[in-house]
Image (cartoon, rainbow, N blue to C red):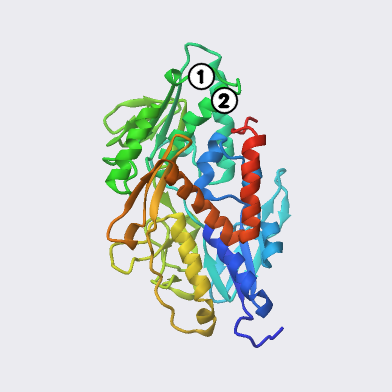
Amino acid sequence: MDTKSPLYQHVVIVGGGAGGLELATRLARKYRRKGLKVTLVDSETTHIWKPLLHEVATGSLDAGIDELSYSAQARSAGFKFQVGRMESIDREQRCIHLAPVKGQDGKTLLPLRSLYYDYLVMAVGSVTNDFGVEGVAEHCTFLDCRSEAEQFRRTLLEAYLKASNSPDQRLRIAIVGAGATGVELSAELFNAARELAAYGLSKLDRDRMEVILIEAGPSILPALPERISTAARQELSKLGVQVREDTRITSVTPEGLLTDKGEMIEAELKVWAAGIRAPDFLTQLDGLECNRINQLVVTPDLRTTQDDRIFALGDCAACPKPDGTGNVPPRAQAAHQMATHIFKQFRKIVRGEPLPAYEYKDYGSLVSLSRFSTVGSLMGNLTSGSLMVEGRLARVVYVSLYRLHQLAVHGYIKTFLITLVDRINKVIRPRLKLH
């Protein structure tokens, strides 16, 4: 190994989401034989694509099958994996500190550890923003990680069974936030009810199940074009979803949600999916600049404003658009593009050369309404307009977004085999996780 190679460096990537995992995999595969050491850090031991968590929450997706082991991926791609939660950083020493890892009995499995880096990439994603609303943390479910989605699935299954055995009982589920997660979860809940009935596990029909989708703004899917929002609203209405727009929640109780007009929206299950913020610990990283929702402020080349050796990508990065129209939106496609940008510019990074600005390309947005429909637009800002798509074509494109993520992580052959296994599982396995 040539120790004088400019690539004889250590890159530490914190966060194994879509962007972080893809970047670790691609850097290691291309440069590990040239002396580059890559270490990925995550508080979990497995990865699942975050846009699929609403399917995990309803049982439409079995996380045990679709999850990816970080350790297995590290062995395959050639990077190192460290399980742990980043606790602090010493920028002068170029060192991050990982909190101790404790077992189920509360005993320490791994002690406090330190990792020294030459370059650090923060890719820790985002969490749901409760906006300080009273009672949200205590009485609402978030879908920020697999464990939360799995917990909601178990609670949901119990609620279905309880309500179905009492002919006079109704099940009311309220979802606050009508972005992509809230809209997609609304549709998945009806799909879950239908599948549970088909397997004989529930007698709950649509007349006794209410799904209430609550949005503070004037329309659902506020970040998407109006015609997509309108199409999605029409599809949700056909399913029976009660869409409540211009409805602001001021507090949450065990019985339901209180609006700013004094109305109580009763619900047995309450999901909060309104807005995002970056994790709180980012605001305490040795002087790195953050914005009001805790995102690390970066320059157009994705470097943090206070340290040229620290980059940020994905939802935790506040990256300005070149046209000055705000920041890059927190989407999976943006995290993928940012990871690709850093990967392509990596030789310039280690040589200390000027970097081109990252430019966000909007390839469109798609919203899956479970097995019932898919709506969205393609091309985004790549053309003078956008192409609206619905139905089977939109569903194919929606699924292909996940396949592109798998391609970046696994390569062509393994992704083909995974796709084949998925098709086989649709035949031999139940359509819903029933346990």
Asked if residue 145 lies left or right of residue 379, the reply is: right
Between 261 and 20, the residue placed more toward the observer is 20
Task: Calculate the distance from the C-alpha at mark 1 to the C-alpha at mark 2.
Answer: 9 Å
Where is residue 385? Give x, y as percent: 28, 57
Q: Residue visible at 66% across and 80% down?
A: 34
Q: Quadrant of residue 76?
A: bottom right
Q: Which numbered circle lies on residue 196?
A: 2
Circle 2 residues within 10 Å: few <14, some 14–19, many ≥20? many
| Identity of the residue furthest to the top in this view | 167
Q: Quadrant of residue 328?
A: bottom left
In the depicted structure, whether residue 84 falls above or below residue 375: below
The disc labelled 2 sits on which kind of residue?
Answer: Leu
Tag 1's secondary structure? loop
Q: Quadrant of residue 251?
A: top left
Where is residue 153? Give x, y as percent: 56, 34
Where is residue 56? Give x, y as percent: 56, 40
Q: Which numbered circle lies on residue 168?
A: none
Q: Residue visible at 56% across and 66% down?
A: 23
Between 210 and 277, the residue placed more toward the observer is 210
Between 39 and 236, the residue placed more toward the observer is 236
Q: Pointers 1 and 2 in contact (CB under 8 A)?
A: yes
| Mark found first going from the N terminus, 1 or 2 | 2
Between 374 and 184, the residue placed more toward the observer is 374
Asked if residue 12 lies left or right of residue 272, the reply is: right
Quadrant for the C terminus, please: top right
Circle 1 residues within 10 Å: few <14, some 14–19, many ≥20? many
Q: Residue visible at 41% across and 77% down?
A: 356
The disc labelled 1 sits on which kind of residue?
Answer: Leu
Q: Residue visible at 47% across and 39% down?
A: 137
Tag 2's secondary structure? helix
Residue 87 seen in the figure: no
Q: Which numbered circle lies on residue 204?
A: 1
